[in-house]
Image (cartoon, rainbow, N blue to C red):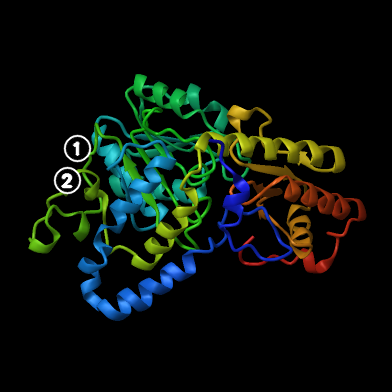
Amino acid sequence: MTTDFTKTRALFDLPEGMIYLDGNSLGPLPRNVADRVAQTITGEWGQMVITGWNRAGWMDLPARVGDRIARLIGAEAGHVVMGDTLSIKVYQALASALEMNPDRRVILSDTGNFPSDLYMAEGLCKTLGPEYRLVTVAPQEVEAAIDDSVAVLMLTEVDYRTGRRHDMPALTAKAHAMGALAVWDLAHSAGATDVKVAEGRADFAVGCSYKYLNSGPGGPAFIYVAPRHVDVARPALSGWLGHEAPFAFDLDYRPGRGIDRMRVGTPPVLQLVALDAALDVWDGVRIADLRARSLELTDAFIKSVEAACPDLTLATPREHAMRGSQVSFRHPEGYAIMQALIARGVIGDFRAPDIIRFGFTPLFVGMDEVEQAVTILAEIMETRAWDRPEFKTRAKVT
């Protein structure tokens, strides 16, 4: 049965009069989340206090919620666990992968990767010693740059600025052929595209949950470890809850079994409960339908904007296979243009130096929103409504 996206839209608490095209940065609030979190606060934390760890199953949330995300990224059950932030999960995956390839010292990434991932790689290299180094090349040059010096290929599947999508199976296959491991960041693809980490033979994958998965600001991250590695990968961050027997309180660390070894600190229960409730929206959603609808929406937006706004330059690939679920355009006054859009109720965002970015989430965005957004954008461009001082003052978050 084909997914009915009018039904999923009704499951979100969307502000009246707003066209929300920024779910690729922060997903909106699903209607059931507030009550679920409130019940956890008052009925569980309030009434059970510390006994909630057992009675309410708080300690099992990282694995249970991880299994729900596994379905959305094409992972095997029992190989995704939640917790901590995406930067920490990047560090964990990179450190484990480097240790599993001890004769090599190079991490290969691309210049379109999210800076935080590159910062974590740089910091890890400095910790490990001067012989370790991060090499970055242009996104289109990655395949040619994978050689027998590379220990780990670290890429974000969908470029956060342009929406360009890497070919996970092909690049992972090249990495493996050259003796390297592959770490994939799914921050801009989980819940947006037809991700297939198992089929694509990813060694590790990580991602956040507050974008297309709608867990709320600062929601927890996830990590996937392939079955062939899960009992071999040594956690660089040997946290208490990654121990084989946390409540034995041994003084020496022994990694837990399977994906549990990638747990670090105490689970963020309220955030995990919010995510668990948000994932109810996905019940009955076919990922193939989501992907098809995403491409319809982004195709329509690209065509209409190019026809109505000739001063904007498309930054997103036209080819379906190379596109995520966002569309980006370039303009020297991109920041002011986006502020003018926001003032008119069209919410996207800006990424330096010149990109205005729009996310298309079929769970709650339809063709009506596409048409209205294009109409407003065209008016702003034609009248130069963006050329006002208040739209050019930079806020902390862009």
Looking at the rendering, which quadrant does residue 159 occupy?
top right
Q: Quadrant of residue 179?
A: top left
Question: Looking at this view, is 243 or 92 the one in front?
Answer: 243
Amino acid type at image mark 2: Arg
Q: Amino acid at mark 1?
A: Val
Q: Position of residue 203 (x, y in %)?
A: 33, 34
Dot 2: within a 10 Å radius of its alpha carbon, few (fewer than 14), some, or many (20 or more) residues? Answer: some
Question: Disc 2 designates what residue?
Answer: 257
Q: Nearer the viewer, mark 1 or mark 2?
A: 2
Q: Is residue 30 above or below residue 186?
A: below
Element carrying mark 2: loop
The quadrant in which the C terminus is found is bottom right
Q: Return the residue at label 1.
A: 232
Q: In the rendered image, is residue 23 in sight?
A: no
Q: Residue at x 54, y 42 (%)?
A: 192
Residue 141 in the image, given as x and y percentages of width and height: 54, 26
- Place of residue 320 in the rendered image (x, y in percent of width and height, measured from the top left): 63, 29
The residue drawn where x is 78% and y is 36% is 303
Q: Earlier in the sequence, mark 1 or mark 2?
A: 1
Residue 294 % position (x, y): 62, 39
